[in-house]
Image (tube, grey):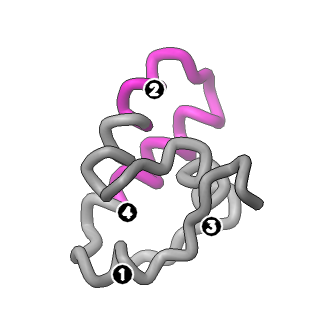
Amino acid sequence: MNRLTVEETNLLSIYIGEDRQELTDNLTAALPYMDGDMKEIAKRALSKVAAMTEAEYGELALYAADEV
């Protein structure tokens, strides 16, 4: 598994949902509103999440941004 960077983890925490599919749906929906570097971080994070197994995704330490 490709490890997530701090930036990718932080971005995923903003768009986290009930499951992996909701997370990817949320982040994909936000892509058109992102620019340059942020869009590249999001695309890289999406590809890493897509390559994860359900077990690997379940082990991620992601928390809703307002809960930290």
Q: Nearer the viewer, residue 52 or 65?
A: 65
The residues bearing labels 2 and 4 have C-alpha atoms spaced at a distance of: 16 Å
Residue 67 placement (x, y as % from top left): 71, 56
Q: Is residue 20 left or right of residue 9?
A: left
Q: Magenta includes 45?
A: yes
Asked if the magenta segment contains residue 38, the reply would be: yes
Question: How many angstroms separate mark 1 from mark 3 (CA)?
Answer: 12 Å
Label 4 sits on a secondary structure element that is helix
Are dots 4 and 3 in contact, CB under 8 Å?
no
- Mark 1 touching mark 3, by CB under 8 A? no
In the shown orientation, is residue 54 left or right of residue 35? left
SS for dot 1: loop
Residue that mark 1 sits on? 1
User: Under tag 2, what secondary structure?
Assistant: helix
As measured in the structure, the alpha-carbon distance from the residue carrying label 2 to the one carrying label 3 is 18 Å
The stretch in magenta equals: 27-48
Specify the quadrant of the image occupied by residue 36. top right
Position of 24 relative to 8 (above/below): above
> Would you say the residues marked 1 and 2 are in contact, meaning their CB atoms lie under 8 Å apart?
no
Please state which amino acid type lies under the numbered disc 2.
Leu
Residue 33, located in which quarter of the rendered image?
A: top right
Instruction: Identify residue for label 4.
Output: 48
